[in-house]
């Protein structure tokens, strides 16, 4: 397992370097400097906090029931730097900082995510293995649960998620993705862009027993009493992104990219029955939010990325939701490498 993690980590690092270098060579469109300017020749350093995770749930519209499983997500603290095409963030679990295992249980994980932003192309790639979840909405399905109780926990549930999004931005002349998400550019006027993309994902889940709690007061279709499930899809997406600039330095960036895919899924239920759903149309959504302050010298703020998929049954009234979350806050300084590159 350690060897496979090292291989995946190496692929992501070298893939990141290759993609960013290729972007510098292939995309030579000059930006409209009235709208944004590049700071790629400045060394950007930052203090940061990162939280990320994958979650899943089942829904039954006929019985008005849903069940949500989340991992115990930790906030890691660290630092990062970027210069030209190279960027690196390192964050660590601080001892004594995430002391809530008694409430949410313990989660073991291998979570590798990379988010690559070039002038035209945005790449999101994920490999996530999680073991140990808790029920996010116990009050909805267990009447006896009280808010001061620990959340119901399932240390036996494990999931694997592998996903990739490739998104093309049409307006790189006036709109900067980098300004909102890695801050080595500075958006000075409000602008937006239509987005076109393609994506693929693979999700699998397994447990030692039925994922529906035995003391649930809600009714779920028998095909949702799962002990394992898997889904794979391939699709296209279309959306929009816009950055609102307020008083030149403050910004709010909002993006939503819904998509549709052809997917197949299968599952094994607690009654030892296996079912298979042939190729069908499935949905997903990719949302981003970024807010903060940006200038020639200083930058700060936070960003949030949510990638959510729905794998429904044949009648569309029940199915499985799964997805990933990525949250980061940051506080940084840009340092001019070339003397007198910018005037104050």
Image: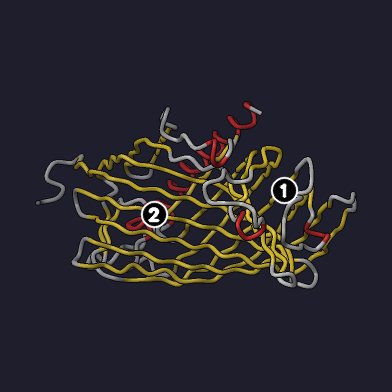
Where is 183 relative to 14, above or below? below
Is any part of residue 109 visible from this angle? Answer: no
Task: Find residue 29 and report its image quarter.
Answer: bottom left
Task: Find residue 137 and report its image quarter.
Answer: bottom right
In percent of the image, x 73 and y 63: which residue is there?
Answer: 319
Instruction: Name the side, left or right, on which 273 lies relative to 66.
Output: right
Check disc 2 and report its element: helix, strand or loop. Answer: strand
Give the residue number, with chain letter if any, for mark 2.
Answer: 303
Give the residue number, with chain letter if any, for mark 1.
Answer: 204
List x then y, in percent, for residue 85: 38, 44
Q: How far apart are marks 1 and 2 (CA)?
A: 27 Å
- The disc placed on residue 259 is none
List x then y, in percent, for residue 245: 26, 67
Is any part of residue 188 visible from this angle? Answer: yes
Mark 1 closeness class: few <14, some 14–19, many ≥20 residues within 10 Å? some
Instruction: Say if mark 1 contacts mark 2, CB within 8 Å.
Output: no
Instruction: Name the side, left or right, on which 66 lies relative to 113.
Output: right
Where is 280 relative to 54, above or below? below
In percent of the image, x 72 and y 55: which residue is there?
Answer: 216
Q: Nearer the viewer, residue 234 or 142?
A: 142
List x then y, in percent, for residue 167: 51, 61
Where is 63 relative to 77, above or below? below
Instruction: Name the side, left or right, on which 105 lies relative to 83.
Output: right
Mark 2 closeness class: few <14, some 14–19, many ≥20 residues within 10 Å? many
Q: Which of 305 and 59 is in front in this view?
A: 59
Instruction: Name the side, left or right, on which 328 lies relative to 152.
Output: left
The N terminus - image quarter: top right
Check disc 1 and report its element: helix, strand or loop. Answer: strand
List x then y, in percent, for residue 48: 34, 41
């Amino acid at each position: 397992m350690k060897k496979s993690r090292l291989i995946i980590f190496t692929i992501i690092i070298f893939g990141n370097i290759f993609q960013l270098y290729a972007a510098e060579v292939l995309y030579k469109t000059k930006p409209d400097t009235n709208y944004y300017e590049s700071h790629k020749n400045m060394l950007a350093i930052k203090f940061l906090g990162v939280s990320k995770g994958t979650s899943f749930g089942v829904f039954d519209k006929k019985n008005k029931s849903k069940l949500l499983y989340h991992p115990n997500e930790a906030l890691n603290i660290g630092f990062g730097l970027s210069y030209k095409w190279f960027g690196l963030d390192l964050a660590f679990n601080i001892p004594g900082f995430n002391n809530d295992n008694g409430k949410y249980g313990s989660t073991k994980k291998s979570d590798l995510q990379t988010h690559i932003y070039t002038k035209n192309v945005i790449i999101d790639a994920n490999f996530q293995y999680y073991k140990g979840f808790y029920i996010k909405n116990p009050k909805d399905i267990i009447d006896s649960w009280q808010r001061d109780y620990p959340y119901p926990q399932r240390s036996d549930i494990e999931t694997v998620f592998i996903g990739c999004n490739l998104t093309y931005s049409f307006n790189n002349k006036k709109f900067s993705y980098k300004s909102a998400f890695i801050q080595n550019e500075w958006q000075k006027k409000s602008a937006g862009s239509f987005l076109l993309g393609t994506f693929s994902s693979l999700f699998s889940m397994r447990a030692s027993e039925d994922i529906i709690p035995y003391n649930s007061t809600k009714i779920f279709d028998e095909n949702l009493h799962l002990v394992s499930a898997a889904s794979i899809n391939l699709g296209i997406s279309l959306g929009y992104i816009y950055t609102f600039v307020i008083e030149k330095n403050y910004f709010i960036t909002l993006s939503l990219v819904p998509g549709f895919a052809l997917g197949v899924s299968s599952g094994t239920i607690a009654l030892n029955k296996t079912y298979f759903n042939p190729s069908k149309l499935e949905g997903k959504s990719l949302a981003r939010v970024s807010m903060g302050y940006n200038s020639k010298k200083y930058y700060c703020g936070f960003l949030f990325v949510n990638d959510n998929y729905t794998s429904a049954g044949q009648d569309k009234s029940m199915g499985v939701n799964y997805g990933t979350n990525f949250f980061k806050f940051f506080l940084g300084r840009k340092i001019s490498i070339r003397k007198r590159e910018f005037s104050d």
